[in-house]
Amino acid sequence: MKVLKRIKEYIKKLSLISSTEGLVVGVSGGPDSVFLINILKELGFKKLLIAHFNHKLRGEDADMDEVFVRHLAQKLNIPLYVGRENVKTFCKEKRYSIEEGARIKRFEFLRKVKEKEKMDKIVLGHNLDDQVETVTMNFIRGSGLTGISGISPESSDIIHPILSIKRDEIVEYLKEKGIPFRIDRTNLSTDYLRNKIRNYLIPIIEKEFNKNFKEKVFSLAEIARYDDRYLDEITEDAIKRMVRFNKDFVCIKIPPFESAHLSIKRRIIRKVIEYFDIDLREISLKNIDEAISIFRKRTGKRIELHGRIDGIKEYGEVVFEKRGERISFPQVKLLVPGKTKISGLLIEINLKEEWERIKDKFSECFDFDSLTLPLNLRLPRKGERFTPLGMKKEKKLKEFFIDEKIPTSIRWNIPIVVDGKNEIVWVVGLRISDKFKITDLTKRILCIKIKLEDDRWNRIFKRF
């Protein structure tokens, strides 16, 4: 048949499936999925498995769909997996829309089946009408090129081999072959945006403006998809040159970013937002352009993005970081010798007779007799001064931080050790004071080793 030939050509053209691959086919019982499983069998694919997910959303109708699919699997002699979950309860707990929650649970189930049975791909029955509805819906919501691309024929392990076939053609095929299918009555409802587009908007456009509207939108999606992929490739190359991803923050080099095209800049910011597990649908173009604007601000300027990310312009780069709990702790007296624990720091102090230089920024040794006890650990205060190792004159702590190119956002979170006269002994991880260094006249040596036991400290010290 003509439809069968078109699907075969579509699969071959895009290299969607090979004859040896194992396929988990999502079958709801509706015309699209029933058509899909019958077509795949007719095309000669051998390693097929039907997966049906009961969302428990439509009461008896949903249960009847499950019974129908069981009979279908038995008739076609194809193994069947059935999953059930009360999606409404899940959505209420997680604050998802019904549509989003149903999609999440359905894909969880499909992937579990795929992994358990060691299959290769998940095959879904989205058709040309679904593509047109998706693109139109995304356009109405203000999506960019990625949204206008619609449903991809192949995305990771998910494929859509009947995406080029119209819904009318599918129903006609099933009726000609005498193949029964189920009708989801909720598709006729206007409660959902997709249904309004399907049942109201598209028929008006086809009647009043362009009778070939579906074909035109399908072509638009294909053009957009290839353009989007090309821009993604350019963006990935740019990211390799200018972006550094860490666990809790992302650094973007300013000069190469500023020389990039605006389209690439926006895509890089989107990648950063995705990295922090934020739904891009919650981010507007205005948010993205505000993030870009910080690259032209003065050093130390900060912006808030989506309430969960801070963007800070620093020396030669802009840092985007998770907004976490701020570190604060009272001044604490250190045991000399001994171990002291506070706010995710373990401070160990020992007295030694001999000194061996260790390349560890969290371990330092001092002339014990030059120190005034007690030693204390605290956060730095603005206006403080000390004499950095190797210098003869005091320097403001702020100037020291600037010279060392320590980001403004973390300067005052770097712990310092002070003695009984409140003189800075050690700016942890950076420099000791020249006043307390070990010399040829040193008789007793005090060594301090600090261990970071809290990720908040790791985030700070990874920044320089």
Image: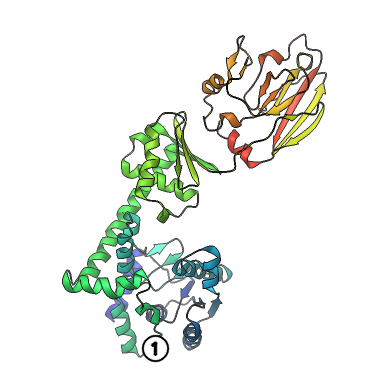
- Residue 129 can be seen, yes or no: no
Residue 362, given in percent of the width and then of the height, sits at 68, 29
- Report the residue at 30% width, 73% height from top: 198
Residue 434, given in percent of the width and then of the height, sits at 66, 14
Asked where in the image residue 212 lies, by quadrant, the reply is bottom left
- Report the residue at 55% width, 33% height from top: 463
- Report the residue at 33% width, 56% height from top: 143
Which image quadrant: the C terminus? top right
How crowded is the residue under tag 1: few (<14 C-alpha within 10 Å), some, or many (20+)? Answer: some
Residue type, mark 1 in image: Pro
Number of numbered tags placed on the structure image: 1
Q: Secondary structure at mark 1?
A: loop
Reply above or below: 89 against 318. Answer: below
Which image quadrant: the N terminus? bottom left
Asked where in the image residue 220 lies, by quadrant, the reply is bottom left
Residue 109, given in percent of the width and then of the height, sits at 53, 70
Residue 3, given in percent of the width and then of the height, sits at 29, 78
Reply above or below: 293 against 110. Answer: above
**Residue found at the very far bottom of the displayed protein:** 178
Q: Nearer the viewer, residue 270 or 330?
A: 330
Reply above or below: 5 against 327. Answer: below
Q: Nearer the viewer, residue 237 or 40?
A: 237
Reply above or below: 89 against 259. Answer: below
Residue matched to label 1: 180
Q: Nearer the viewer, residue 199 or 226?
A: 199
Q: Nearer the viewer, residue 339 or 1?
A: 339
- Residue 351 can be seen, yes or no: yes
